[in-house]
Amino acid sequence: MKKAQIAFVTGGYSAEAEISYKSAITIENNLDKNKFDVYRIDITPTAWFHAAANGEKIPVDRSDFTLSIDGVKIHFDAVFIGIHGTPGEDGKLQGYFDLLDIPYTSCDATTSAITFNKRYTVAVAGAAGFHVAKSVHLFKHNYQPESIPQLQFPVFVKPNNGGSSIGMSKVEEPAQLKDAMEKAFKEDDQVLIEEFISGREFTIGVFKSAGKIITLPFTEIMTDNAFFDFEAKYKGKSREVTPAECSEEMALKIRNAAAGVYAVFNCRGVVRMDFIYNENDQEPYLLEINTVPGQSAASIVPQQVAAMGTPLMDFYSMLIEDALSNKKS
């Protein structure tokens, strides 16, 4: 039986390329080479290429996303997207692959673009009836410090597009806001200021297989830092408990919210959602949706897959097979 030709894309155009390359190690080691012929494609600001075994960098023909190796033109059956940040998480690559009718292992272009924008994510989720924090969306070109509407402190200040908590700050009082805004605007032209929700922080992976939405055993995040920032995520300054220790009532609310959000946003592939469970309200508040969640040794989704009792290789195969089922022609 002929094996499917799979392009595994990594790298990217943003500061998150560093995380993409960490994820790439785990992904490459766990793609089933007995089922798939896998070609790693590095997508960088200066070139798209496949590094051959002899070190040669073979360019991608962007007109049809093919490779020419030893006179043979390779057409891909599907793409495994492993790029965090732009252009792999914000819908740009997804739109390109849609034009070429090449299926891929992530949400579609529309969902990716919406969820990459934190403000639009909470606006859609809030309109759909899910609990979200009160927030303000600001643009660099017309930002005036005195124009910020009144919010209850503490607040989080974060770049509106992007991930890995890069450029994010927790602000305890108005006097600290200026520095936090400058830090966030260095990463993005849009900034989100969001009221702090007190409670326990949980993160949960959700994926679809054979048409069924499945929630992974979720994780509680505990950190000595002010919040789950870049250091806590990637430099070991957090404690993660998987599966989380909580009541079944709380667990059911989190699982139901995650599955509901996945359905409302028409997600595909595996996504990771962050929630704060407010114990006063006894409800989970959605913080954000990550449509290309980290897969490095320090990442949460691989931990949750292990807690589910599924080998990571089998899990990635399910994602690829689900993507292949979406091919239109």
Image (cartoon, grey):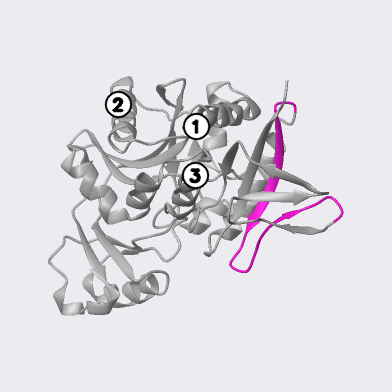
In magenta, the rendered stretch is 34-54
Q: Residues within 10 Å of mark 3 (few under 14, many from 20)?
A: many
SS category of the residue bearing label 3: loop
Is there CB contact under 8 Å for labels 3 and 2? no
Q: Report x, y in % for residue 150.
A: 12, 66
- Give amino acid for label 2: Asn
Which quadrant of the view contains residue 196? bottom left
Which quadrant of the view contains residue 305? top right
Which residue is at the front of the view, 282 or 320?
320
Reply above or below: 297 against 50.
above
Circle count: 3
* Residue holding disc 3: 293
Marks 3 and 2 sit apart, C-alpha to C-alpha, by 20 Å
* Residue holding disc 2: 256
Residue at image point 41% right, 28% down: 245
Q: Going from the N terminus, do you reach mark 1 or mark 2 first?
A: 2
Reply above or below: 53 against 176.
above
Residue at image point 74% right, 31% down: 33
Q: Going from the N terminus, do you reach mark 3 or mark 2 first?
A: 2
Which residue is at the front of the view, 111 or 15?
111
- Give amino acid for label 3: Pro
Residue at image point 35% right, 49% down: 115
